[in-house]
Image (tube, rainbow, N blue to C red):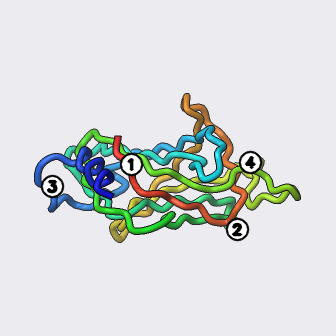
Amino acid sequence: MLSLAVLLGTVACGGHDSAANCGTSHLRWRLTRLTDKRPGAPAAMLTARNTGSQACALDGVPELDAQVGKAQGTTSKPKKGKAHRVVLDSGRTIDFPVFYDPHLAPDGYCFITADLDPSLYVTPPHPARHDYGASTQLTDAKGHHLKAQICEDTIQIGPPQPR
């Protein structure tokens, strides 16, 4: 736990205890598919970059939703525990591991298959009243668009990992 606190401290500099919550207008999101197929490894990495001119705070984990039209969709929840407050200086980046099963079940079942190409939306933690988040795309490590395939009805977001 101490090492996490030390790592989180690298994102923030100085006394930013009063930093406002990060809103969608402060952040640029990127969702990158990971290739590690070991059990328990994240399927993707959700990256937030503070493009605002001031530091802002992330108090928890963002929400990531995948939608197919107005019908089928998934929502996210924190993977475990409570995420700590992280102050993100202007220009800094932070990563959130994203856990879901992108592979068909042995019987061929998948909640949202890639051929449906779901729309992906990210909302920062504790958004302001009229902050509805932003759309994003799933990409490979080189930034090429991938069609998301989510074979379960819940996405889990892990604690922040500063760069």
Q: Which residue is mark 1?
A: 161
* The N terminus, quarter of image: bottom left
In what element is the residue under mark 1? strand
Nearer to the camera, 149 or 137? 149
Q: Between marks 4 and 1, how big is the CA–CA gap? A: 28 Å
Q: Between 43 and 20, which is closer to the camera in this rendering?
A: 43
Query: Label 3, label 2: how many angstroms apart (C-alpha)?
Result: 42 Å
Give the amino acid at mark 1: Gln
Vertical order, 143 against 51 (above or below):
above
Q: Which amino acid type is shown beneath numbered disc 3?
A: His
Q: Residue at x 48, y 48 (%)?
A: 46
Whole-angstrom CA distance, mark 2 to mark 1, is: 33 Å
Provide the residue designation for mark 3: 16
Q: Amino acid at mark 4?
A: Ala
The residue that appears at 52% across and 47% down in the rendered structure is: 136
Q: Earlier in the sequence, mark 1 or mark 3?
A: 3
Q: Secondary structure at mark 3?
A: loop
